[in-house]
Image: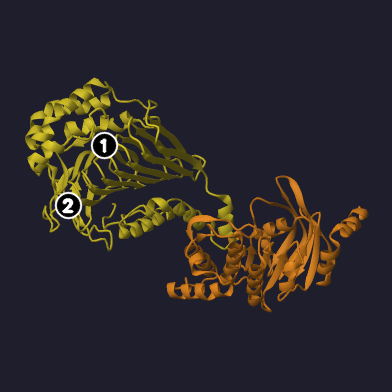
């Protein structure tokens, strides 16, 4: 589904990703962990096409297409979704209009008619329930005045609406209390299928108690330096990153 | 004296008898003073205070025809069907500067709506020219040449059951200057809602409107005045709106520029009675070579009054916007609250915005603030929307629309608010080529 080969990327002339390789198949959950500043968020930004970053090398194919050649909106239409670490507030744009525009743009891309108003509202209602998102929030401006937990729930709500093939959850657990974490993780698990895949970017094992990964990768200094099964996350929780840092730094 | 103005002064001197012959005494009574003011004071030059970005002389320079002889312009295709859908209005049309009566002057709500030329003499004698000051060149020129326009008179305690809608329209086959004058008198406790739409029917023709609006809101009266321009790149508009508020009155003015050529809108509001409330809102959406220039002056002359002012501009391409806003709180006006804001989006690197907020306060115990910003679209919000699949153009449109939402929300007529939201959306999407507020086709 997703194949990243030797991906290099920089921001303002500073190279952050220095040769990332990663392959994700349908039905899989991958966790990407790593110390601060290792490039985790950069990876998600580059994959979704954030114009602040420049790709300086490598290739990414997504469902057979050259992902890096697509605009951010077309990447979304092809089924890529990012749950933002810091969801953006958009005063004056209601959640309803925002979601309707997103859904109908995607339908247009795939040659489908816009969703009728009643079908759309029905879909909103149905998907809202998955993350227990209050109707009041759904009628407000996008993320405006939402608490940290509400913003993250709103991200998963959007994911539920857009039904992506590949979801990247960037630090979705940050700023969440235990109850909100459970709601968000349950939402993600309910949306999981054999046809879609998830990349979970996180600092902590905590989230992985709820969203069970098939693979755990450690990103350090812009490269994936270690990949293993879920047991690696537990080991990292116990021992921290220093032993990996040492291993890597000694090789150079 | 500049040639731009001279041609109109010469026209007046040559045609004085004709002009006086067509007009009520109250209009004629002010002409000598208007002439004197124009003769005595040269036109303000571009760059001068309050005209930093506006070339009044250039706007007045072309040789426009003035309808001195009160010829009827073809009005046959004008006075039908112009309604904001679902907004049941009492509709009146002003073709060029001639009032067209197709409705009874009095409706069942007893609010009088009529041609200024046929207005009751006593009302005119008492109120005409009582608010607008001849020191302003636009007012002086209008007063010198005005022969007709609109009168709205709400007797004490009367309420317009349906909003009044006035369509100002240019449809002449030659360059024309329309000298439009409006007088709104809201007696104590009355409530008047007026929606004015400026339209132009022939996009290839040059037009100039010189319009003055006087609004008198007496004790406890409420006046809502919505002024929407939807014209063409070759339409020039010089508009000066003057309000006098008495004790406990409530006035809302919302000036909306959706499509235009060169526009100058002045708002002069004098709050003379205590406990009055003023809301002055405005928005301008300009692209191409459009120019929108706003001058506002709110004078608080009485205690315990509140004014809220907000103007928002979205400028694209080579559009130029200007805002000069002044709030004056005179001595002995405690507990006045006055807030002014001007927020602007430049959507292109070639659009220009000039802004000048001013507060002048002579009483200690007041709350006043002003704020002004000029910025670009929020790139983070843009990327967030694109990452959800919303294409760049649509995302931009949605963000610009969102930027205007508080001005739209300031419209108290719900159906007009919905309609305006739709019009603004169409404007940003670039397909506001025909008047969507009514059925008039732009040819």
On screen, residue A222 versus residue A184, left or right, reads: right
Question: In terms of secondary structure, where does tag 1 sit?
Answer: loop
Q: Residue sitting at 51 percent across and 72 percent down?
A: A124
On screen, residue B314 versus residue B145, left or right, reads: right
**Chain hosting mark 1:** B
Q: Residue sitting at 80 percent across and 72 percent down?
A: A230
Asked which quadrant contains residue A188, the reply is: bottom right
**In the orientation shown, which residue stands out farthest toward the bottom?**
A194
- Seen from the viewer's position, the closer of residues A147 and B284 is A147
Q: Position of residue A59 (x, y in %)?
A: 74, 60
> In what quadrant of the picture does the N terminus of chain A appear?
bottom right
Position of A165 relative to B436 (above/below): below
Q: Position of residue B214 (x, y in %)?
A: 22, 40
- Seen from the viewer's position, the closer of residues A126 and A175 is A175
Chain assigned orange: A
Tag 1 or tag 2, which sits nearer the N-term?
Answer: 2
Residue B174 in sight here: no
Chain assigned yellow: B
Q: Position of residue B143 (x, y in %)?
A: 19, 33
Whole-Å distance between the Cαs marked 2 and 1? 20 Å
Circle 1 Cα neighbour tier, 10 Å, few/some/many (<14 / 14–19 / ≥20): many
Question: In terms of secondary structure, where does tag 2 sit?
Answer: loop
Asked which quadrant contains residue B328, the reply is: top left
Position of A65 relative to B336 (above/below): below
Mark 2 highlights which residue?
Answer: B157
**Chain hosting mark 2:** B
Disc sitting over residue A222 in the figure: none
Mark 1 highlights which residue?
Answer: B272
- Seen from the viewer's position, the closer of residues B138 and B430 is B138
Residue A205 in sight here: yes
Q: Are marks 2 and 1 in contact (CB under 8 Å)?
A: no
Circle 2 Cα neighbour tier, 10 Å, few/some/many (<14 / 14–19 / ≥20): few
């Amino acid at each position: 589904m997703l194949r990243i080969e030797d991906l290099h990327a920089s921001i303002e002339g500073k190279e952050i990703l220095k040769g990332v390789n990663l392959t994700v198949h349908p039905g899989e959950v991958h966790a990407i962990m790593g110390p601060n500043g290792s490039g985790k968020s950069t990876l998600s930004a580059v994959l979704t096409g954030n114009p602040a970053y420049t790709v300086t090398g490598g290739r990414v194919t997504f469902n057979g297409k050259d992902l890096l050649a697509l605009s951010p909106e077309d990447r979304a239409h092809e089924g890529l979704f990012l749950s933002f670490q810091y969801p953006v507030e958009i005063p004056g744009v209601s959640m309803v209009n925002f979601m309707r525009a997103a859904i109908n743009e995607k339908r247009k891309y795939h040659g489908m008619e816009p969703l009728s108003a009643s079908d759309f509202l029905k879909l909103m209602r149905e998907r809202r329930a998955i993350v227990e998102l209050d109707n009041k929030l759904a009628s407000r401006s996008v993320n405006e005045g939402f608490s940290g937990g509400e913003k993250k729930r709103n991200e998963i709500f959007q994911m539920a609406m857009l039904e992506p093939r590949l979801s990247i959850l960037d630090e979705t657990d940050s700023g969440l209390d235990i109850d909100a974490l459970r709601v968000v993780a349950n939402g993600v698990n309910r949306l999981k299928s054999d046809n879609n895949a998830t990349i979970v970017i996180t600092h902590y094992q905590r989230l992985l108690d709820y969203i069970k990964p098939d693979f755990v990768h450690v990103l350090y200094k812009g490269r994936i330096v270690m990949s293993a099964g879920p047991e690696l996350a537990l080991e990292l929780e116990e021992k921290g990153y220093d032993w990996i840092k040492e291993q890597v730094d000694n090789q150079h | 004296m500049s040639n731009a103005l001279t041609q109109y002064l010469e026209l007046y001197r040559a045609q004085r008898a004709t002009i006086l012959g067509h007009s009520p005494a109250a209009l004629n009574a002010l002409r000598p003073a208007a002439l004197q003011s124009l003769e005595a004071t040269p036109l303000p030059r571009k760059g001068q205070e309050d005209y930093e970005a506006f070339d009044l002389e250039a706007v007045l320079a072309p040789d426009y025809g003035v309808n001195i002889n009160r010829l009827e312009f073809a009005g046959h295709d004008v006075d039908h069907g112009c309604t904001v859908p679902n907004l049941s209005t009492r509709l009146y049309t002003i073709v060029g500067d001639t009032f067209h009566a197709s409705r009874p002057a009095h409706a069942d709500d007893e609010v009088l709506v009529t041609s200024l030329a046929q207005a009751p003499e006593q009302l005119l004698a008492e109120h005409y020219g009582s608010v607008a000051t001849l020191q302003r060149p636009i007012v002086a020129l209008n007063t010198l040449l005005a022969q007709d326009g609109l009168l709205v008179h709400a007797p004490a305690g009367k309420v317009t059951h349906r909003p009044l809608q006035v369509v100002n329209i240019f449809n002449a086959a030659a360059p024309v200057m329309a000298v439009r004058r409006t007088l709104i008198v809201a007696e104590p406790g009355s409530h008047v809602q007026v929606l004015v739409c400026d339209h132009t029917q022939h996009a290839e023709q040059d037009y100039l409107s010189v319009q003055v609006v006087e609004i008198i809101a007496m004790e406890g009266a409420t006046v809502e005045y919505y002024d929407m321009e939807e014209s063409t790149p070759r339409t020039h508009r010089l508009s000066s709106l003057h309000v006098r508020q008495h004790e406990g009155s409530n006035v809302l003015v919302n000036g909306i520029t959706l499509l235009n050529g060169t526009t100058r809108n002045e708002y002069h509001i004098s709050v003379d009675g205590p406990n009055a409330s003023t809301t002055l809102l405005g928005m301008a959406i300009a692209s191409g070579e459009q120019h929108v220039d706003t001058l506002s002056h709110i004078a608080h002359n009485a205690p315990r009054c509140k004014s809220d002012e907000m103007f928002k501009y979205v400028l694209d391409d080579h559009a130029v916007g200007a805002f000069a806003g002044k709030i004056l709180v005179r001595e002995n006006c405690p507990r006045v609250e006055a807030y002014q804001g001007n927020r602007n989006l430049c959507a292109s690197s070639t659009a220009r915005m000039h802004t000048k907020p001013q507060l002048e306060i002579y009483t200690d115990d007041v709350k006043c603030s002003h704020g002004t910003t000029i910025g670009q679209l929020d790139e983070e919000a843009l990327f967030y929307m694109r990452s959800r699949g919303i294409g760049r153009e649509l995302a931009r449109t949605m963000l610009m629309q969102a930027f205007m939402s508080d001005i739209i929300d300031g419209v108290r007529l719900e159906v007009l608010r919905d309609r305006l939201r739709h019009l603004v959306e169409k404007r940003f999407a670039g397909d506001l080529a025909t008047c969507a507020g009514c059925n008039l086709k732009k040819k």
